[in-house]
Image (cartoon, coloured by chain):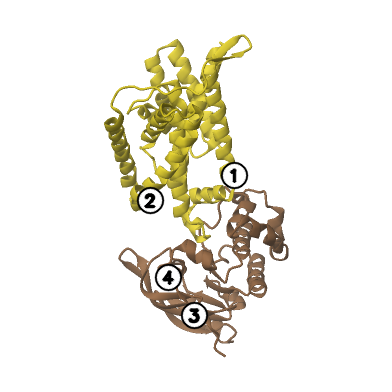
Chain colours: A brown, B yellow
């Protein structure tokens, strides 16, 4: 059965100044699905997420979300529509407390108060650190905070940029669990961009390889031959 | 001696309330609002017109705040917002706006110095001394404004959103914060505070089309020294405002007028972070 696309892009072209980074990227993400976009550094993975969110303008092509044309929509409206974005860099407000960072993830303080206890099942450590300044958390804890904040939004789609980067194996496993929990609990679809092949194939349903701004290969993450085929693409 | 201490305290608090509006606009919008002095002047004339119309002088501050807030919203929408992507041009636009406001005031009210009635005449006896009741009242109002601003920034959702925009606007937008609305409200609030400050200080001084200029310079230096922090601004106002009073009293009023600028420059030379903390 073909699932209805919740988020899709068609022929997306975007870049910075006169330099185009994406050259006609198309993909679709169904409700509750996890899609991993894989690629080496500089292939356009982060630019793809920024273009979907509206931080980088799409020069050509179209983005559709929940049946509506979202091309050129402002980032704050995309977030309010139900897309949570976890960027790779400058991900948290270092000088705010953990609680303040989390509050910013929820649409209102009332919603935050109603949802915050749910973190007990996913990242209980965050509830112990609510009054701590976010900048004093360890690297792994900052990633937990990033994920927790995204989860509190109860998004329809999460866009996650290389969450595994710089994490220890145990923490990567926690992140994989958290993503699965997010899907099971909220039914949200997830688009991750990654270089960590094992992590991506563990959490994703499907994968697509982004090479020099174009999707060059797609497949099912559960396919036994996927890992070896993808390793070639990700070789430095 | 007690009067000198009270002069230092009240002058500092008046400086604080004048600089507060400039600080929040700089913090949220990364914009040095050179029209701040002109907004203060508008507040001064609002106070004069209020009392001339026979309305209670106590209402001049709130009226100036409201007038400045809505005027600020319009200015942000039609002058500042189109220049968001050109920050230097936006700063120059506020400078030009300040000149235009000054000229319009001159056209409407003339160049001469005018006065507004004080809502509180006479002195208050504090132990062995008598001190201006209105200066004490303005100091109390300044503290209340400081407390109100702190509460707004640290106890409300708007404040949390504003602080998020101050720290990382891109990230804030990605979390659904309408940074354009935060900027507009902030500019309105900053303009309103400037006007209210003008209305508050007018009964202590006088009004003329250029009354805001020296306040703009001192406010600018205080904000440079304190960064985007209300407690730091209060500390900077207390230290530099007190120094201004001391120099004016014991050395020369002319040198006193330069004290804040000179001390702020020296502080920044020694420590680029100035007196910023928190």
SS at badge 2: helix
Q: Are marks 4 and 3 on the same chain?
A: yes
Front disc: 1 or 2: 2
x and y percentages locating residue A179 in the rendered image:
63, 71
The residue at which mark 1 appears reads as B154
Q: Are marks 2 and 3 on the same chain?
A: no
SS at badge 1: helix
Q: Is residue B120 above or below residue B22?
A: above
Mark 4–mark 2 Cα distance, whole angstroms, equals 35 Å
x and y percentages locating residue B68 in the rendered image:
43, 39
Q: Chain of mark 1?
A: B
The residue at which mark 3 appears reads as A28
Give me the disc on residue B77: 2
Q: Is residue B32 above or below residue A128?
A: above
Mark 1–mark 2 Cα distance, whole angstroms, equals 26 Å
Front disc: 2 or 3: 2
Q: Is residue A220 left or right of residue A60?
A: right
Q: Residue furthest bottom?
A: A1
How many marks do you count on the picture? 4
Q: Is residue B111 visible?
A: yes
Front disc: 3 or 1: 1
Nearest to N terminus: mark 4 or mark 3 = 3
Q: Is residue A107 above or below residue B67?
A: below
Circles 2 and 3: CB distance less than 8 Å?
Answer: no
Front disc: 4 or 3: 3
Quarter of the picture containing the N terminus of chain A is: bottom right
């Amino acid at each position: 059965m073909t699932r209805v696309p919740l988020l899709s892009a068609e022929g997306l072209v975007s870049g910075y100044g006169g330099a185009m980074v994406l050259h006609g990227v198309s993909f679709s993400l169904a409700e509750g699905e996890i899609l991993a976009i894989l690629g080496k550094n500089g292939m356009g993975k982060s630019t793809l997420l920024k273009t979907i969110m509206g931080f980088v303008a799409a020069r050509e092509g179209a983005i559709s979300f929940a049946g509506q044309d979202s091309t050129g929509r402002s980032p704050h409206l995309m977030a309010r529509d139900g897309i949570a974005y976890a960027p790779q860099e400058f991900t948290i407000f270092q000088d705010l407390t953990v609680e303040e960072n989390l509050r910013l993830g929820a649409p209102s303080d009332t919603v935050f108060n109603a949802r915050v206890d749910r973190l007990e099942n996913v990242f209980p450590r965050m509830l112990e650190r609510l009054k701590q300044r976010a900048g004093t958390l360890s690297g792994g804890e900052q990633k937990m905070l990033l994920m927790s904040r995204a989860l509190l939004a109860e998004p329809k789609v999460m866009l996650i940029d290389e969450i595994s980067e710089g994490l220890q194996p145990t923490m990567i496993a926690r992140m994989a669990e958290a993503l699965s929990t997010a899907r099971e609990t909220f039914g949200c679809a997830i688009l991750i961009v990654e270089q960590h092949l094992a992590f991506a194939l563990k959490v994703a349903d499907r994968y697509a390889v982004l090479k020099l701004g174009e999707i060059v290969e797609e497949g099912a993450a559960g396919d036994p031959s996927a890992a070896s085929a993808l390793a070639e693409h990700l070789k430095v | 001696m007690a009067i000198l201490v009270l002069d230092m305290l009240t002058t500092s608090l008046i400086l604080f309330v004048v600089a507060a509006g400039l600080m929040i606009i700089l913090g949220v919008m990364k914009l040095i609002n050179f029209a701040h002095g002109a907004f203060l002047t508008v507040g001064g004339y609002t106070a004069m017109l209020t009392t001339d119309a026979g309305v209670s002088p106590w209402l001049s501050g709130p009226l100036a705040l409201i007038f400045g807030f809505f005027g600020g919203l319009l200015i942000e929408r039609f002058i500042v917002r189109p220049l968001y992507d050109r920050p230097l041009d936006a700063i120059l636009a506020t400078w030009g706006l300040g000149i235009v406001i000054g000229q319009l005031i001159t056209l409407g009210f003339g160049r001469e110095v005018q006065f507004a009635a004080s809502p509180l005449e006479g002195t208050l006896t504090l132990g062995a001394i008598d001190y201006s009741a209105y200066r004490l009242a303005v100091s109390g109002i300044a503290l209340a404004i400081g407390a109100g601003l702190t509460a707004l920034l640290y106890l409300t959702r708007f404040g949390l959103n504003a602080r998020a925009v101050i720290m990382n606007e891109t990230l804030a937008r990605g979390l659904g914060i309408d940074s354009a609305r935060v900027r507009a409200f902030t500019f309105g609030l900053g303009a309103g505070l400037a006007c209210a400050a003008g209305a508050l200080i007018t009964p202590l001084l006088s009004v003329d089309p250029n009354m805001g200029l020296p306040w703009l310079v001192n406010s600018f230096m205080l904000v440079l020294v304190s960064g985007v922090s209300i407690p730091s601004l209060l500390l900077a106002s207390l230290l530099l405002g007190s120094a201004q009073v001391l120099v004016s009293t014991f050395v020369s009023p002319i040198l006193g007028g330069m004290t804040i600028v000179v001390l702020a420059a020296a502080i920044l030379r020694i420590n680029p972070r100035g007196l910023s903390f928190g």
